[in-house]
Amino acid sequence: MIAISEIFGPTIQGEGALTGVPTVFVRTGGCDFRCSWCDTLYAVEPRFKADWTPMSARAVLAEVERLSGGRPLLVTLSGGNPALQPLGELLDLGHARGYTFAIETQGSKVQDWFAQLDHLTLSPKPPSAGMAFSQSRFDACLAAAGVNTQVTLKLVIADEADYQWAREFAARYPQLPLTLQPCNPVPATPDEPERETDLEALNARLRWLVDRVTADGWFNARVLPQLHVIIWNNERGV
């Protein structure tokens, strides 16, 4: 059974290399990290476990098909950390019906079913997240991707220390398409679900990041905002 926090859409992917692509989100419950700026604590912390629904792969796909009207599109597997869940059967069933699958994970847990993914976004957490990084686990996740899996690297930037860390980290993986994303300075929390982010501060952080990248001539990096935050602020289910 898969622990499901929420399934919603169709909407658009709001971040990373697939920004703007129509998708249905399957958000799983549970995570092995507790990032300082996490914006989905309701899918992370054990205190919300009672809100997560155990679902079979067939039940998950049935809900995806209902939301998409049976028209195959991209399915985004999110969390929490979706790499903690048994998603291989869902990938098999969905592919048989024409769906494609993308996942974002921090690279802390490897699964054999990574080889079945159409898109694998690896997003190791920078120093501002306050979490330890394991090079060996990240490399194992990278190695588990299939020959037809499109692998990209996405790094969140909150400050100058994160930026310098990202420069060093990305240099180890020049073969991976790279997206840089400014961190949301005021994410919603379970205690303040209607909290509005500071869009002026977010835009200032984005402009700062663009200026840093262009000044350094870091031209293989793509800089993108969290598009869904700009459009819908901190709302859920979009």
Image (cartoon, grey):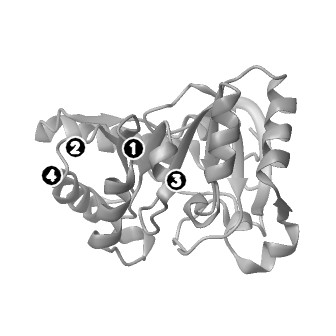
Label 4 vs 2, first from the N-terminus: 4
Image height of 182 relative to 210, above or below = below
The residue wearing badge 4 is 171
The residue wearing badge 3 is 113
**Residue at x 53% of width, y 42% of height:** 200
Q: Position of residue 94 (x, y in %)?
A: 68, 36
The residue wearing badge 1 is 146
**Residue at x 51% of width, y 31% of height:** 19
Image height of 143 relative to 75, above or below = below
Horizontally, is 19 left or right of 42 in the view? left
Say whether residue 196 is visible.
Answer: no
Label 1 vs 3, first from the N-terminus: 3
Image height of 120 relative to 45, above or below = above
**Disc 3 secondary structure class:** helix
Which residue is at the far top? Answer: 71
Mark nearest the camera among 1 and 2 is 1
Spatial distance from mark 3 to mark 4, Cα to Cα? 27 Å
Label 1 vs 4, first from the N-terminus: 1
**Disc 2 secondary structure class:** helix
- Rendered image quadrant of residue 237: top right
Residue type pointed to by label 4: Ala
